Amino acid sequence: MTTGGEEATATTPSLDPAALLAAVIAFRDRMLAREDEVNGLNVFPVPDGDTGTNVLLTLEAALAAVDPALAIHDPDGSRPTLRGPLATVTGNEATDPADVCQALTRGIILGARGSSGVILSQAVVAVLSTITTTTAPPGQVLAAALERARAAAYAAVAQPVEGTILTVLSASAAAASAAADLPLPDLTELVAVEARAAVARTPTLLPALARAGVVDSGGRALSYGFDALAEVTGGRPVPLPPPAGHAVLIPADAADATLAPPAEQPPEGGGRYEVVASLRTDDSGAGLLRDRWRSMGDAVVVSGADGIWRGHVHTDDPEEVLAAARELLGDTAVDNVTRTDLHAQIAAQEPTPPSVHADGSPHPRPTSAGLRVVAVVEGDGLVRAYTELGAEVVDAGAASPSVQDLLDAIEGSPAGEVVMLPNHSTVAPAAEQAGQLASKPVHILPARHPLAGLAALVAFDPAADRAANLTAMRAALQRTRAGRVAPVVREAVGAVGPVRPGQWLAISGREVVGVGSTPVEAALALVDHLLTPRTEVVTVAWGPPVTEEQVAQLREELSRRSPGAVVDALAAGHHDAFLISAEEMPDEEGTVP
Amino acid sequence: MSVGVVVDSVGCVPQDVADELDMEIVPLSVAMDGSTYRDGVDLSPREFYQRLAAGPPYPTTSAASLADYVAAYQRTADKGYDEILSVVLSRELSTSIDTATAAAEQVDLPVRVLDSRTAAAPEGMIAVAAARRARTGAGLEEVLARAHEVAERTSLIAVIPDLMPLYRGGRLNAVQAGVGRLLQITPLVTIRDGVVQVAARERTLRRAADRLVSVVRSASGGRPTTVWAMEAGGRELAEQLAARVQEAVPLAGPMRWTAFTPVMGAHTGPGVAGVGYSLGEL
């Protein structure tokens, strides 16, 4: 396609560091406008899900690494004190492009927060490293970069889940590969359209989203990134889409979710097949086809120039859309047709084995310089409990910790080797990243709740060797069931019935297990879910929404329901009303002669 | 050439055993309510733990006096021994070792001071094993070698059922101990590298007891083991633990009861219970 010689190359937008930087700035500005929207794309109607904030802060960290003046947040991630006119790239023209690339790469890797932030950072890094190492035409560079990003993202998660940011990244990469010969502005527009369609598809892949009536938050954020890239490379403004609605339905519970198949009907972005074709036409023919296809399918892009055009559409009936194209443009005007079954493509994504760090065994060096625990915890009381038990604490109070925060804690520990307790599912990917970047072995345990992590920490013995500790800590995690009680912040309907602000939800893992008109009522529903006949220790951590009387009330109920269990309550100062864990007694290993 | 063995009161050697082996015991000092007492001489461990449980101001302990050490060495010399092995609690726990060394220069017979690197029952077990060897007519080097040999396979494990008295008295630095004050955690302590360390933490007393038994069982590995039970004013728990250990390991000789030394008890609080154990006979 590059027939224009040097002059054409000079005017063709390219994927260079300046464009990337501009795209990251535009992305950040979109996230600034849509932070609350993305935060609100949460399957539970409780204060939670800070995906929007995490992505925004990730981008801010990347920009700050290039030039602190580009970021509008403080380096520690605190809220911007002033949202004045946004910085522009123009001040950076004197900067060496290679330096910009390096700074962006470093900034986004270390500044990544939350699972979406980490996956996003991998995508940006893949693009950056591809543009600096190849001289291929920009479309091919983008296609290669997105493929690389996709592979990296899938490799980074232990159990890839479709209907998430991964799906959106995957769809964008596939679209870019299928149309890599398009001019960059058209390709980036197509990728952005694909990304939006994939976001719309996420509820069909993840039942929890369908039940909540939301699209995936991380996918939504990534799609804003592709919009920004399209705007910067296309030179045309890409408007913000209408804000997505908040969740109105609460996913029921695990049993229900596994029984129910994913929703059959695709939502507005649906269409099982992706059809891509080369077209011989002109502007007016392209316009006609665009209108016709829009009445038949989704994700319609018809773009090109000089008689060579590409068409792209999602449909349930590929032959119907192809027939329409031939009818409008002529039989010979349509060729190089590809039909892709998007559902099959998604089903074919192989789960990747967990990272070596999750297991601990691949690290060659046994403990000698000592092993210590680094944990991510929120709330004064929990921070103190963890500290007293000998852990280095990363305080997640202000925001989900960045890769840099975790790395600082790992490197700051005097130990030669570290056991990491991420304690939140959203922190796990950043922990993996930090573990890979660290100069010492890091063993990341699958702790997904601060009190589960606490049980593992109690089992930690600084004098024991690594293998014994990892075994004991994993066993403690397996013995511990945990959940939380949080206030309802918006009206919603779920298996527990309609809920409204003023009520309290009991949540364990990804399940809502109860609702109550007081935090204690919800806590008791949670306790009923967590307690087993073998429960030996119940730990209750309570936050500011709860009064001391309510804690006493809960304790009393607990001793009635589980007279044999030891009950501990601590004022944790976290934002939830209650965090509760139930730890079972270990097998009778200790008493067999 | 005969070797007499001297040990400090922290070793908790039962009086009848000390008498049988002709050992001298040097008392450490306990300061309590304005008076100074000699551990095991003017003040029994039982009295000490009763006083400790009564609350602040808490008793404090200090090293043995030079006069007491010189007197113990002198008595040993007077009994006709040619050399002395003086077994002392870990340098990290007390300055007694300096006193024991200084006292050696004030008597006319050779005194070898041995830092046991431990305290309580294990220290006593090392001293007793050395004294037994000395009774066979062995020389100082051989007695010392025997002490080292036994030290290698001797340890203790104890449960601290209630940390609150210590926290209230400001006697336990939770961060150093690695024990959360906010949770009901039952630590198990041992002495490693000469210092008291938390060996394990459990969320319940029942589990801590299980852990204690399994520690001793795995150290024993089914071989005959010498066990000294230790109590510090909490006889009931100590008896339960002792009974379970007795079931779990084959004993080399009858189990002895010892009072957990006030010198450590002052730091761990009343109610500590556990066992000292040594693989094989002493």
Image: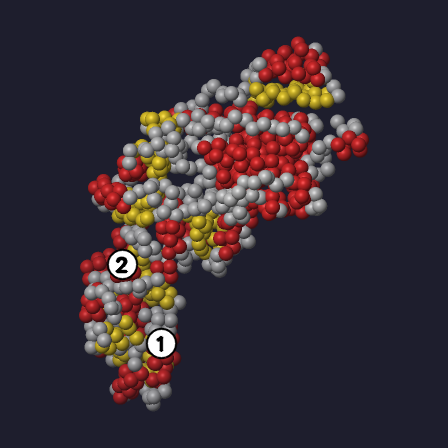
Res B245 seen here = no
Q: Position of residue B196 (x, y in %)?
A: 35, 65
Q: Position of residue A432 (x, y in %)?
A: 51, 45
Q: Chain of mark 2?
A: B
Disc 1 on helix, strand or loop? loop
Circle count: 2
Q: Position of residue A558 (x, y in %)?
A: 24, 42
Q: Nearer the viewer, residue A351 or A70?
A: A70
Q: Chain of mark 1?
A: B
Mark 1 burial class by Cα count in 10 Å: few <14, some 14-19, many 20+: some
Circles 2 and 1, Cβ within 8 Å, touching? The answer is: no
Q: Position of residue A62 (x, y in %)?
A: 59, 44
Q: At 36% across and 33% down in the image, what residue appears?
A: A488
Q: Which residue is mark 1?
A: B95
Q: Which residue is mark 2?
A: B164
Disc 2 on helix, strand or loop? helix
Most distant residue in the top direction? A327
First along the sequence among labels 2 and 1: 1
Q: Nearer the viewer, residue A454 or B31?
A: B31
Q: Quadrant of residue A307?
A: top right
Res B122 seen here = yes
Left or right: residue A245 versus residue A86 is: left
Vertical side of A552 occupied by A341: above or below: above
Q: At 52% across and 31% down in the image, what residue appears?
A: A220
- CA gap, disc 2 to disc 1? 28 Å
Which quarter of the rendered picture does the N terminus of chain B lie within?
bottom left
Amino acid type indicated by mark 2 = Met
Vertical side of B39 occupied by A231: above or below: above
Q: In the image, which disc is placed on residue A552?
A: none
Mark 2 burial class by Cα count in 10 Å: few <14, some 14-19, many 20+: some
Amino acid type indicated by mark 1 = Thr
Q: Nearer the viewer, residue B12 or A148?
A: A148
